[in-house]
Amino acid sequence: MAKTKVKVPVKKQSFGVYMKRYWQLYLLLALPVIYLIVFKYVPMVYVQIAFKKYNITKSPWVMPWAKNNGMEYFIKAFSNPDFRRALRNTIGLNLLDLVIGFPIPIIFALILNELVFTRFKKVVQTITYMPHFLSWVIIYGLAIQLFAPSTGLVNMLITNLGGTAVPFLNDTAHWVGTYIFLGVWQSFGWNSIVYLAAIAGINSELYEAASVDGAGRFQKMWHITLPGIKPTIVILLIMAIGNILGSGFDRPFALQNNLVMDWAEVISTYVYRAGIKGLQFSLTTAVGLFQSVVGVIFLLGANALSRKLGERGLW
Amino acid sequence: MKKKVLSTLLAGMMVLSLAACGGETGTQQPAEQPAATTETKTEEPAAEEPKAEEPAAEPAAEAEPTGELVDGKFADTREITVEIYDRGNDGGSDPENNDYTRWIQQQMLEKHNVKVTFQKVPRWTEVDDINNLLAGGTAPDVCVTYSYPTIKTYADMGGVIDLRPYIDDYKADLPNLWNWLGESNLYWDSDPSDGTTWAIEAKLANMSRVVTYIRKDWLDALNLPLPTTKAEFHDALVAFKDNADTLLGKDAAKMVPYSVSYDVGWRAATLIESFIDPKISDKEYYVNGFDDRKLTQNGTKDAVKLLNEWYNEGLMWNDFAIYSSGDTTEDDMMKAGYVGAFTHNWDYPFRNGDDSIEANLKRNVGENAVFVACDPFEDKNGGHNKFQAGPIDRKVFFPSTNDEPLASMLYLDFISDPATIEYLQVGEEGVTHTVNEAGAYQIQAATGDAIQNSGMNIDYTITCNGLHLTSEDLTMNSLAYSYAGIDPQLVIDAYKIANTDARVGINVPVGDIEAEGGVGDTLSSKRDQVYDKAVSAPVADFDKVWDEGIADYLAAGGQAIIDERTAAFERVFGDADMIP
């Protein structure tokens, strides 16, 4: 990032002056702002349907209120065993993802950083972030080719070596493992890029000074690299925690099948099934709203906590 | 200066890209616009369903000017869009633009001065897709779906036009529609209390449903008879498995003696139905009949238990549950010759001309490799009990975004004309058929734009499913020859078996069951889960898995439907068990 130093006028200028001077920049800024308003804020009008009886032909302002002071659909959702199961699964799978999936890119970035042979390092980096660009549908196709109980390559290998086939995809416990594994495989290379960038920003004089003081490789890693990227880790962790109730749609949807549904149905797929396919728009808007609100609470909580512990936090 | 130009340019580009996005969202407008007109009418928030009347009010105002049509023709050209299934066949023709669409377009313009545009919807995910289109307000004017609950849900939200006024008021202009569908199909979905009709039921000309197929060449090679009982069928499966080395050689490990997909309720239907009492009362059948896969009928559990035993004996496809709807893996196994037997739509292996399962099997395995129909599942009376769905098929409806309901009705009338149906089904002589010495149409594989993507073009004849020619003799005679490259005897046998001991479904006019709204998809996906888990459970766990699954299904809305159906039946028919 090349920064050109501009003399910042200390005196406060009126908006008009700035406008005149930087109108091109404001013009460029206006468009993304309009985009956000049109596509992100205007649709929020429809958040109302969580509290109203949805009708496709009416504007949300005139739809009748739902029963129980508008809370009908929230009550309905929480008394629905399917929703509770989806909620449990979302939290469970996301926690596993967090516990297993979060540290791996960090460890990977640290290891990669220690490699001396730069060409090898670059090749490894490219290979590991490649899966990030594959759609989950394709990954599921690969998973079936590899892990299907009788025709999957891995299981054919196992059975040919005299073992019994492992139900990677058709037994709930194994499926959860496969789900986490594929998620980590798909994203760890990509996620490590941020950490590598952070590591690259650490002042090299620190390493030199440590070497002079006789620090070994692990000591340098522990006392310089890790503290150096700590702010990055914290920020990403806060965002990950904020996302504990959210989940992408493609990954669970592509990977789930009828045999593992008890553990594979998450909120996003439940919303799709019950809301879009089952046309219960009010119910699923309520679910979506709940999901967002809890997400924001988690995000704020994690942020406050990190600031209390002396980190910078998101803002 | 440079900066200025560049920034203006960039900004301009963004505006353009935004405008492009805006164009798409703009089409949503019509869906929202009626709000203004209907709002004013629904002052009193009366009982629960006041909206049912809104769309009815609209045509009443419009129904007046019968003078719109002169000799069945509009004075000015009207435009409608019509849904067409896209089957994505290998090497098929473009469903929106081929010989048949062009013929329909030309005829409609000539006869009614209506310009028709086709809009394709993927066949195997049609319910999802039509849902998305309806929600987005971009559905075609004439929509077709197999899912009545979807239509009903949208109707409840005011998203569907009540067809009753058009059916009744324009009866004189719709002679073919009335002749072909008659009151029974036109009014099938009418509300018994106020007559509102959200959909017209297409007619099933051929009610054959599901048949079990088995590899005749394998039976012959092992000196086995065509199975006529469950025990014989089981013996045959075991024999296939035990002799896999002889039958398949190096591919022995790939053998699947009996193949069933994730959709067990359909793909083992003949077996399941054989466990249901042939004399089941109309009431019991109806009460448990929300699910057409018969999950909650008495007897289904025993059938699945048997399947579960077969599964654990290694007689079935191990991986069935991980492949979902529309996946061709299983078809490919049949085509490659790994499958010994399967149950499917009565004409399934004959479909698609050169790409049919039978044709592929011959190519891949050898001239005598063939699937033949069999009837191996005896019921408790020794017959071969089957349940047919009744003379109804797809449901045709008009979303409220349809501005040309009359032109759309004329389209339905045109498409129900016996001459239209015959032309679409058999096509041009020399291109899609020849006339044989018996006077029957003999279908041949067509090429290019003349390819029929669906058997007998049923995707275009939306009010008719099944061969229906201008005379009945011709129909029966031609049915056997209607599958290109297939031995007519195979078709005749399958047809006979599909209609052996078949009980035809009847209409149970008790009005809407409120509990059925919005849960169709949740329940059908649950039903598949129950079936799949039960079939693949260890034998010792079967009862537990089945009972838990059913309990979950019932709790998710199944029980509410059963209760409401019971109450509705008793309200209309009193103590009677059978519908008079």
Image: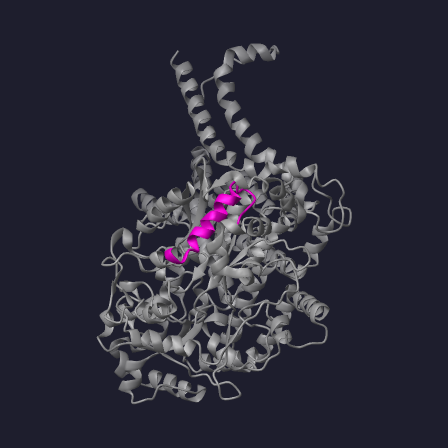
Image coordinates of residue B474 in percent, x first then y, are 34, 68
A264 above or below B307?
above
Point out residue B145 in the picture as x, y percentages from the top left corner: 49, 56
B234 in the magenta segment:
no
In the rendered image, residue A124, in percent from the top left (x then y), is placed at 34, 48
Q: Which of B377 and A183 lies nearest the eye of the viewer?
A: B377
**Residue B577: in sight, yes or no?**
yes
Which residue is painted at 31% across and 49% down in the image?
A: B98
- Residue B532, given in percent of the width and then of the height, sits at 50, 71
Q: Nearer the viewer, residue A187 or A252?
A: A252
Q: Specify whether B208 is left or right of B477.
A: right
Instruction: Locate the N terminus of chain B and report the quarter of the image it occupies.
Output: top left
Residue at coordinates 70% horizontally, 68% vertically from top-left? B572
**Quick check: A298 left or right of B372?**
right
Quarter of the C terminus of chain B within the rendering: bottom right
Q: Magenta segment, which residues? A: B398-419
